[in-house]
Amino acid sequence: MAIERPQGVHREWCPDCGDEMLFSGTQSAGYAQYFCQNCRYRHDVYVGEPAVEASAPDEQVTATADRS
């Protein structure tokens, strides 16, 4: 699954075949996840926490437990 790459997250190319990899998301630790469809290769690249925070949705949802 590929989603639109946020503006602050750069493009990444597969080290094996050279094709542009699909952006598949970010992790809160500052990593962007990419996937090469040709090689079936996943690659995580550190892009920095500010880039990840900028790509997060405007609304934050917090789950709370109902203790009643």
Image (cartoon, grey):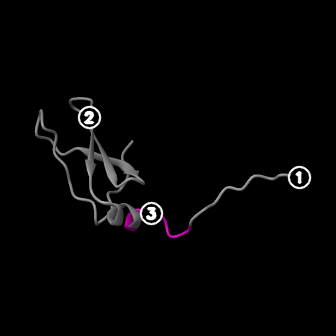
SS at badge 1? loop
In the rendered view, tell whether residue 59 sits above or below residue 21.
below
Q: Is residue 38 magenta?
A: no
Q: Which residues are magenta?
A: 54-59
Residue 34 quadrant: top left
In percent of the image, x 57 and y 65: which residue is there? 60
Pinpoint residue 13: horizontal percent, then vertical percent: 16, 45
Instruction: Tell me the residue that label 1 is attached to.
Output: 68
In percent of the image, x 15 and y 41: which residue is there? 19
- Of callouts 1 and 2, which one flags the residue occurring earlier in the amino acid sequence? 2
In percent of the image, x 32 and y 51: which residue is there? 31
Residue 26: give its label: none
The 10 Å Cα crowd at callout 3, few under 14, some 14 to 19, many 20 or more, is few
Instruction: Left or right? Give the position of 58 relative to 13.
Output: right
Pinpoint residue 25: horizontal percent, then vertical percent: 38, 50
Name the quarter where the N terminus is drawn: top left
* Viewer-nearest of discs 3 and 1: 1
Residue 56 quadrant: bottom left
In the rendered view, tell whether residue 45 sits above or below residue 37.
below
Measure the C-alpha gap from mark 1 to mark 2. 48 Å
Instruction: Looking at this view, name the residue that lies furthest to the bottom.
Output: 58
Instruction: Left or right? Give the position of 42 relative to 60.
Output: left
Q: Is residue 58 magenta?
A: yes
Residue 37: give its label: 2
- The amino acid type, in three-letter code, at marker 1 is Ser
**In terms of depth relative to the viewer, which is nearer, 51 or 1?**
51
